[in-house]
Image: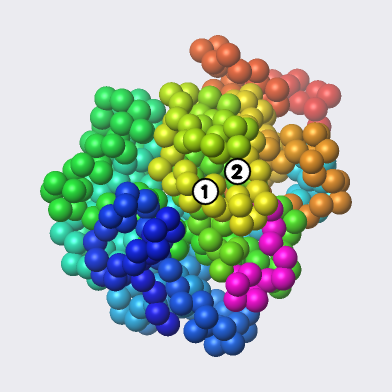
Amino acid sequence: MRAWLQCDRCDATYPLHEVRYRCECGWLLDVTHELEGMRGVVSRETFDARHIELAGPRTSPKHSSGVWRYTELVLPVEDEEIVSRPEGNTPSYHHERLSEWVGLDEFCVKHEGENPTGSFKDRGMTVGVTQARALGARAVACASTGNTSASLAAYAAMAGLPALVFIPAGHIAYGKLSQALAYGARTFQIEGDFDDAMGLVQRVCEELDIFLLNSMNPFRLEGQKTIVFELLQSRGWVPPQWIVFPAGNLGNTAAFGKALHELHVLGLIDTIPRLVAVQAEGANPFYLGFMGGFRERVAVRAETIATAIRIGAPVSYWRAVRALRWTDGLVMQVSDQEIMDAKAQVDAAGIGCEPASAAAVAGVRKLVAEAVMDRSDSVVAILTGHLLKDPQSTVDYHSGDTSSSLKATYANRPIPIEASVDAVRRSLEGWL
Ligand code: F0G
């Protein structure tokens, strides 16, 4: 299997072992696989034959990981080189009440928050850190709204690589900050937002010779493609009509489009699902670009309760535009109120997710209400992060915290009570 780095604008190519993220012309690079050579060699059966096995000291990651199962389409490497937790193999859930709430018969959520560090980032990080080690990197770094830093810190610790993370002070959920600190990353809280941190980390990596592991790194995207591979494989390679997900820095948008394009070129799927990237109203540069026909790259100053997607100048902008072109995709926006209400519904279904993930579910409900989706359409939403990543937002919502302007539409308030059975009985009257 042959792969190389390639520019989508000027077609320049570079070898995989060259440390570079951008082409000489300034465009971001892709990992390009020689798909022609794979026709007939790589098939659905190739992946179906790799039965999932529990990770043990000698289990091949190609069996235990939902990323490395697709190694031919991710990164052709030997087992010994791989740094894996293992990740992936995430479940999909169908829940009657949640489906009813969004207005669909056939709705399911694939829970990427059930990855080792609680977000989809682990799928990209296993590939990024594997490549970092293969290149002999002396350290790895990222800017982050929280999840990337948690994942980088964990995988770097496993690989024995020093990790630097740059996060916006005061705008990262506590679960994520605690992970970066616990896993031993050198954690820089910068004054400014994610977009400032992103600018800084690029200069730091360039000047201090450190491997950059944000999603502008093409190896990260190769790992994140497997969300779509696994989703399709779990459905017997029968695609849903829509795949809906939250969008911030646009790494997933770019990766999902590339995944579907490659599967289609290889003949592993006959139809291509439509992608829907959902942004928060206060952090909506991609939505504004979409509404303007993508004539130019839009940037905004971002503000939203969903801190994971509080991003105003997404890095993978143009390759995300390409993903929409490949999939006849859409972009939409939802308010913070819609996000938190959708989160309350996902949580109350016993599934649970962090606020950014719920944007996807809010987006589905809106598309059904606007009759863009039909009740009978098959739709999969990607939940990107775990409920426990951001406990504060959940507790504030349910206890009706007055500092927020949001309405607790589906509040489940904690009940202060005297410690007696009588008091419990009184409180339960009319409830049980
Ligand atoms: N959902 C969650 C939970 C995220 O953490 C992120 C991004 C996204 C959605 C958006 O994905 O950037 O590929 O469009 N989090 C990054 C971080 C930026 O630093 O953890 P995207």
Circle 2 SS class: strand
Residue 214 percent coordinates (x, y)? 35, 49
Q: Splitting the image into 4 quarters, where does residue 339 fall?
A: top right
Q: Splitting the image into 4 quarters, where does residue 103 fall?
A: top right
Left or right of 141 in this view: 389: right
Which residues lie in the magenta part?
Answer: 263-275
Residue 311 percent coordinates (x, y)? 44, 33
Q: Is 211 rendered above or below residue 130?
A: above
Image quarter in which the N terminus is found: bottom left
Name the residue tied to disc 2.
Answer: 277
Circle 1 SS class: helix
Seen at 65% across and 75% down, the residue is 268
Q: Amino acid at mark 2?
A: Ala
Question: Is residue 409 one of those drawn in magenta?
Answer: no
Q: Amino acid at mark 1?
A: Ala
Q: Is residue 44 visible?
A: yes
Left or right of 432 in this view: 189: left
Asked whether mark 1 and ligand 1 are closer than 8 Å, the reply comes as: yes
Asked whether mark 2 and ligand 1 are closer than 8 Å, the reply comes as: yes
Question: Is residue 266 one of those drawn in magenta?
Answer: yes
Q: Earlier in the sequence, mark 2 or mark 1?
A: 2
Q: Is 17 rendered above or below residue 221?
A: below
Residue 28 percent coordinates (x, y)? 37, 52
Farthest-out residue, left: 208
Farthest-out residue, front: 10
**Of residues 254 and 84, the one drawn nearer to the viewer in this rendering:** 254
Name the residue tied to disc 1.
Answer: 320
Seen at 75% across and 56% down, the residue is 241
Q: Is 402 rendered above or below residue 102?
A: above
Dot 2 and dot 1 residues touching (CB under 8 Å): yes
Farthest-out residue, bottom: 41
Image quarter in which the C terminus is found: top right
